[in-house]
Image (cartoon, rainbow, N blue to C red):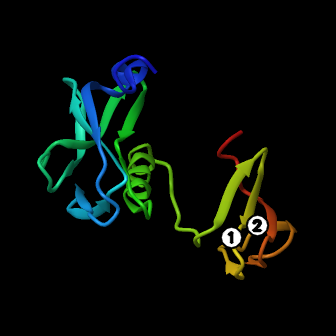
Amino acid sequence: WEAPLAAPIHQLAGINSLYYDHLPHNLYGKVDFGGMKYAWNNWADVLTPAAGTDVWAVYADQFYKGAASVIHRRLGRGTATYIGTDTDDGKLEKEVVRRVYTEAGVPTEDLPYGVVKEWRDGFYIALNYTSDIQEIVIPDEAEVLIGSARLEPAGVVVWKEKSDNKYK
């Protein structure tokens, strides 16, 4: 790419400028999001937000302390959120995405690590990508078509909720 980093999405995300940093493998910086601190060391975009862009998270240390790490911008009937920091454990990213969904009025749930749940064409599908048995919550009124809430390693469960009209 022979232009400023992420230049094609600057206007969309509400970025005036950015530069990046990474730390040595044994040194961690912190990002403050919602009063919680999250560790990072492998990638950090340091953002200068454009006017009208909200700063959701800032760097809590290093020489760019106070600089934007996560920004959020309203666009028409939607929003754009830019997460500039890559954490090893993904906890910052998870909480940012949770906030995006919460602000959009979309419910979220905490699934066990390695379990993926999707809604597709009127059916819910959960997959267990771990080597351990995982339990998931399936509503009592749901009709289970394949499998069960007890997911064996590499297991799958498919169900349909009888009152599911939210996507029709």
What residue does disc 2 label? 142
Q: Quadrant of residue 146?
A: bottom right
Spot occupied by residue 21 in the image (x, y as percentages of width and height) = 28, 44
The answer to whether 142 is drawn above or below residue 67 in the figure is below
Question: From mark 2 to mark 1, how far is it between C-alphas?
Answer: 5 Å
Q: Quadrant of residue 126?
A: bottom right
The answer to whether 110 is drawn above or below residue 14 in the figure is below
Spot occupied by residue 100 in the image (x, y as percentages of width and height) = 41, 46
For the C terminus, the quadrant is top right
Closer to us: 56 or 16: 16
Q: Quadrant of residue 125?
A: bottom right
Spot occupied by residue 22 in the image (x, y as percentages of width and height) = 31, 49
Name the amino acid, label 1. Answer: Pro
What residue is drawn where x is 26% and y is 30%? 18
| Left or right: where 30 falls relative to 117 | left
Name the amino acid, label 2. Answer: Ala
Spot occupied by residue 165 in the image (x, y as percentages of width and height) = 70, 47
Local crowd at mark 2 within 10 Å, few (<14), some, or many (≥20)? Answer: some
Closer to us: 33 or 24: 24
Closer to us: 128 or 5: 5
What residue does disc 1 label? 139
Which SS class for mark 2?
A: strand
The answer to whether 163 is drawn above or below residue 127 in the figure is above
Callout 2–callout 1 Cβ contact below 8 Å: yes
Closer to us: 157 or 8: 8
What residue is drawn where x is 44% and y is 64%? 89
| Left or right: where 112 falls relative to 31 | right
| Left or right: where 162 falls relative to 85 | right
